[in-house]
Amino acid sequence: MQNLNTIGDMVTLLRGGIFQVLMLAAPMLITALVVGLVVAILQATTSIQEQTLTFVPKVFAILFVLAFLSGWMFTRLGEYTLQLFSIIPDIGK
């Protein structure tokens, strides 16, 4: 097991948590970015300035990515949670 007595160990633990958040949010954020860019290019070329035209495709794309990657996301989150629970007894030492 890992001994968490120093500030550096705690910083490493927090860094791991931030990395997990970024890894879980990145697919949806990148999808929203790409879909938004494609819709913006289409709006610029056709001169259509409808606000719902940018919102609805992003929502559907994010829901699709979430449905497609939810198994991987829950597995990764579960592994990280188990890792944190295994470290809890060492924190009190």
Image (spheres, grey):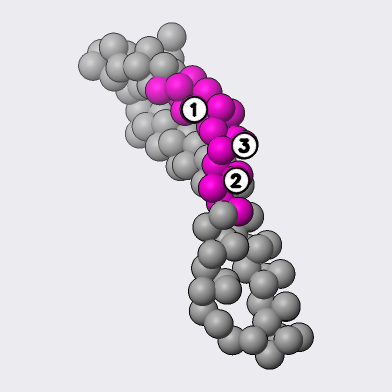
Mark 3 residue element: helix
Q: Quadrant of residue 91?
A: top left
State how far apart marks 3 and 1 are (Cα): 12 Å
| Residue labelled with disc 2 | 64
Disc number placed over residue 74 in the picture, else none: 1
Q: Which residues are magenta?
A: 61-81
The residue located at (67%, 72%) in the rendering is 39
**Residue 67 place in picture, x, y as percent:** 56, 38
What's the CA distance linking mark 1 and mark 2?
16 Å
Mark 3, residue position: 68
Is disc 2 surrounded by few (<14), some (14 to 19) or many (20+) residues within 10 Å?
some
Q: Nearer the viewer, residue 74 or 59?
A: 59
Q: Quadrant of the N terminus?
A: top left
Residue 8 in view (yes/no): no
Asked whether disc 2 touches disc 3, contact meaning CB atoms under 8 Å apart, the reply is yes
The answer for how far apart the CA atoms under marks 2 and 3 are is: 6 Å
Residue at 71% from the left image edge and 69% from the top image edge: 38
Left or right of 91, for residue 29: right
Q: Is residue 18 in view?
A: yes
Task: Give the camera-side residue of 91 and 84.
Answer: 84
Q: Is residue 18 left or right of residue 42?
A: left
| Residue located 35% across and 16% down the image | 85
Looking at the image, is mark 3 or mark 1 nearer the viewer? 3
Query: Who's the residue at 57% across and 73% down the image?
Result: 53
The reply to whether dot 1 and dot 2 touch (C-beta < 8 Å) is: no
Neighbor class of circle 3 (other Cα within 10 Å; few <14, some 14-19, many 20+) is few
Of the two numbered discs 1 and 2 on the same chain, state the one appearing first in sequence.
2
What predominant SS class does the magenta segment belong to?
Answer: helix
Residue type marked 3:
Phe
Q: Is residue 14 left or right of residue 44?
A: left
Give x and y (percent) for residue 43.
Answer: 68, 82
